[in-house]
Amino acid sequence: MSDAPASVQPPDAGHTAHRFFVIQELLGTPELARFYTDLLINSPTTITAARERQDFSKSTAYKYANMLAELGVAEELDEYEDGSALWRADPVSGDWTDEITLEFGPAIIAVYGATSVDDDLGLYVDRHGKAALAPAVMATIAYLEGETTRRGVADDLGVPAVEAIAVTQAIERVLAVVKNFDPTLSDVAFEVDVHERALEQGPYQRADE
């Protein structure tokens, strides 16, 4: 019999691995990320209402709803509105640690989802890659907290000022709507106001506002 010690996993290793897998899946398809975000910020809501807000076909919307249910981040409730079942989505978040620790949560998922409908975000990803979204989100949060300026964001990201202005404006329209649904932003207080007109131009809308 081997005297080698048995491999012992932390009690939450399975849960952590599952969250990591879910985040990977949501960051793999922007339309899925966008649909998840809409369900999250409008829970409970119907699939019909979500697909109309996001302009998805009926088949695509139900495909994404079923995918989210299989991932364990959304579920169909035993409640109805206008004859349609209500759905609820739950926030998912996790840390990725390498040289630094990054927190991934609904905000980054929502921004990634918005790349499929926001020209400025789509262009930013085309130029710099999907991985560049996380630093851009973090820099925009710093701007909204009043810790830097948009030109300071440009310096931090190493992009022209006009590009930094465009991408931070696009991201802040998302963050203003998603912030209260992201546990990783629970301690963040925005000092910079996002104008109502800007929110109306954003990819996500709260149905009750």
Image (cartoon, rainbow, N blue to C red):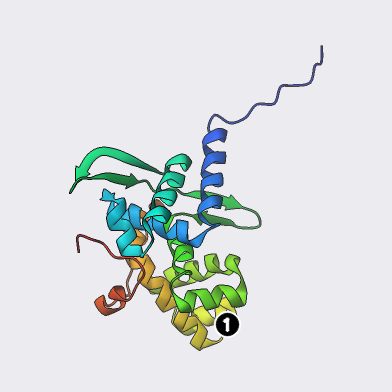
Q: Is residue 126 left or right of residue 179?
A: right
Quadrant containing the C terminus is bottom left
Q: Is residue 138 left or right of residue 207?
A: right
* Residue beneath the point at 65% across and 54% down: 98
- Picture quarter containing residue 66? top left
State the SS at label 1: loop
Q: Nearer the viewer, residue 123 or 145?
A: 123
From the viewer's perspective, is residue 72 above or below residue 104?
above
Q: Position of residue 201 (x, y in %)?
A: 32, 76
Question: What residue is drawn where x is 56% and y is 72%?
Answer: 125
Q: Residues within 10 Å of mark 1 (few under 14, many from 20)?
A: some
Q: Amino acid at mark 1?
A: Val
Spot occupied by residue 134 in the image (x, y as percentages of width and height): 53, 65
Q: Residue at x 65, y 26 (%)?
A: 8
Residue 127: percent from the left, percent from the top?
A: 60, 78
Name the residue beneath numbered marker 1: 159
